[in-house]
Amino acid sequence: MSAPIMLSAVKPSNQLTLGNYTGALKNWVRLQKDYKCIFFAVDMHSITVKQDPIALRNNTYYAIAAYLAAGIDPSKSTIFVQSHVPAHAELSWVLNCFGYMGELSRMTQYKDKSAKEGANIPVGLFTYPVLMAADILLYDTKLVPVGADQKQHIELTRDLAQRMNGLYGDDLFTIPDPYIAEVGSRIMDLQDATMKMGKSDSTAMGAVYLSDPEKEIEKKFKRAVTDSGSEITDADDKPGVKNLLSIQSALTGRPIDQIVQSYVGKMYGHLKVDTANIVIEELRPVQKKIADYLADLTELQKVLDRGAEAAAAMAEKKLKLVYERIGFAPSKKMH
């Protein structure tokens, strides 16, 4: 039997953070051993908010370079850019016609992001979970690694798939399952440990970017907000300390309780410095490889072209089946 398909992506709307690295890239590298993996940069999702064209293009290349630098192997996994495979947009329109306004308006991320947009809320901000569903359903995806904040979108994807399967045959779409890593899936902001470390939501000192120089990483961890008291524990009432422990565990593989034991009698300052050093050592070779890829985009473009070709072959097969089932007249293009 062939391995199940696992799919995930990163939005290249800003440079990637330590949270993206621990929660996504490191997990992806492990998972590509056991699954047929599809990884891509979702540039179409990025334009739900205004983007500088040059920055978007550069961030897209940066995201792909980071995938490769982290250890994702293009000979094992399919790597591409979302806009290079038109079937994503085409299936998204079909799914839009089977989604409901009510279920989309309940999406937590829509509520949060639309509140920042004022009166002129882009339609894409409302419907982008449907595009995400198309991303997943095009490839008979079984497993979708996501952060806990994205689980609601997987539930919507499942609902849309089951709705259409009920109308057009149980074999139309594979029903995907979310995969949420126990460690590293939710790295928090260094200045506000109640908020996820994000590419756009965090403050300059709250997020550690993969592109940050070593001195900048060290400075950010030294200024990380911890908690009252002085004992280093994995307690819910110490979110700042808990976050630093989680980062160490995600990068070293050591259990958190073991890390806690190593800090008995030590101060918060020790934890901050040690965590900074662990992050710096982890990211140093990754940063070097990213720089090498970006210095010569030829190899990167070859990876993207091969990946888009492989992805399109899978996606167009699924789109053809959907078009047949819903009653579209056959097209020479889809043969």
Image (cartoon, grey):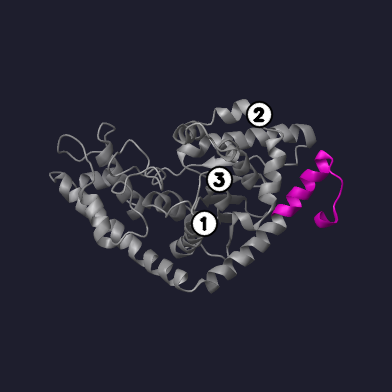
| Mark with earlier residue (3, 2) | 2
Mark 3: give few (<14), some (14-19) or many (20+) Cα within 10 Å: many
Q: Amino acid at mark 2?
A: Tyr
Residue furthest out toward the top:
102
Along the line of sight, which residue is nearer the eye, 199 or 32? 199
Q: Looking at the image, can residue 75 be seen?
A: no
The disc placed on residue 144 is 3
| Residue 21 x, y percent position in the rendering | 41, 54
Majority secondary structure of the magenta segment?
A: helix
Residue furthest out toward the front:
119
Quadrant into which the N terminus falls: bottom right
Residue at the spot 30% in from the left edge and 46% down from the top edge? 206
Residue at the spot 21% in from the left edge and 48% down from the top edge? 223
Q: Helix, strand, or loop for circle 3?
A: strand
| Mark with earlier residue (2, 1) | 1
Q: Amino acid at mark 1?
A: Pro
| Residue 217 x, y percent position in the rendering | 27, 56
